[in-house]
Amino acid sequence: MSSSSTAVLLETINFAAEKHRNQRRKDPDATPYINHPIGWTAERVQEYFVWASRVTKGLRGTNAALEEKLQLLFLERGVEF
């Protein structure tokens, strides 16, 4: 992953964490809404990118600038967008 893609990913993660910082899941442990992929295996990270690509495909046409950045990020991971 290039340094610019990594920066975009980190900005995205930080944005999501800030917006959801006080939200908790309804599970018995009230886990945080945002769980960072720290400590994930490479396989798990790749699975997450595949899942995220499927989710974002349904939102195409809403934000061209963000879609362009996501497309570059997914392509670097070898994930279709």
Image (spheres, helix red, strand yellow):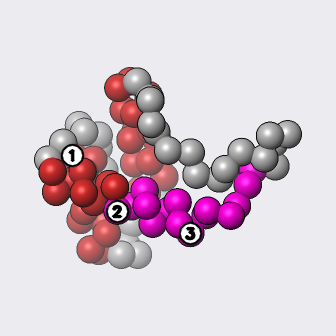
Q: Position of residue 81 (x, y in %)?
A: 31, 50
Magenta highlight range? 11-25
Q: Is residue 24 left or right of residue 47?
A: right
Q: Quadrant of residue 78?
A: top left
Q: Is residue 4 left or right of residue 12?
A: left
Residue behind mark 1: 75
* Whether residue 8 is situated above or below residue 63 in the rendered picture: above
Q: Position of residue 69 (x, y in %)?
A: 25, 62
Principal secondary structure, stretch drawn in magenta: helix
What crowding class fits label 3: few (fewer than 14 Cα within 10 Å), some (14-19), or many (20 or more)? few
Task: State the separation of the CA atoms marked 3 and 2.
Answer: 12 Å
Residue at screen point 46% across, 39% down: 37
Q: Is residue 21 visible?
A: yes
Residue depth check, mark 3 versus mark 1: number of the one nearer the observer: 3
Work out which quarter of the rendered image holds the N terminus and state it: top left
Residue at screen point 26% across, 74% down: 65
Residue behind mark 2: 11
Q: Position of residue 60 (x, y in %)?
A: 39, 66
Residue behind mark 3: 19
Contact (Cβ within 8 Å) of mark 3 with mark 1: no
Q: Earlier in the sequence, mark 3 or mark 1?
A: 3
- Tag 3 secondary structure: helix
Task: State the separation of the CA atoms marked 1 and 2.
Answer: 18 Å
Answer whether residue 14 is magenta in the image.
Answer: yes
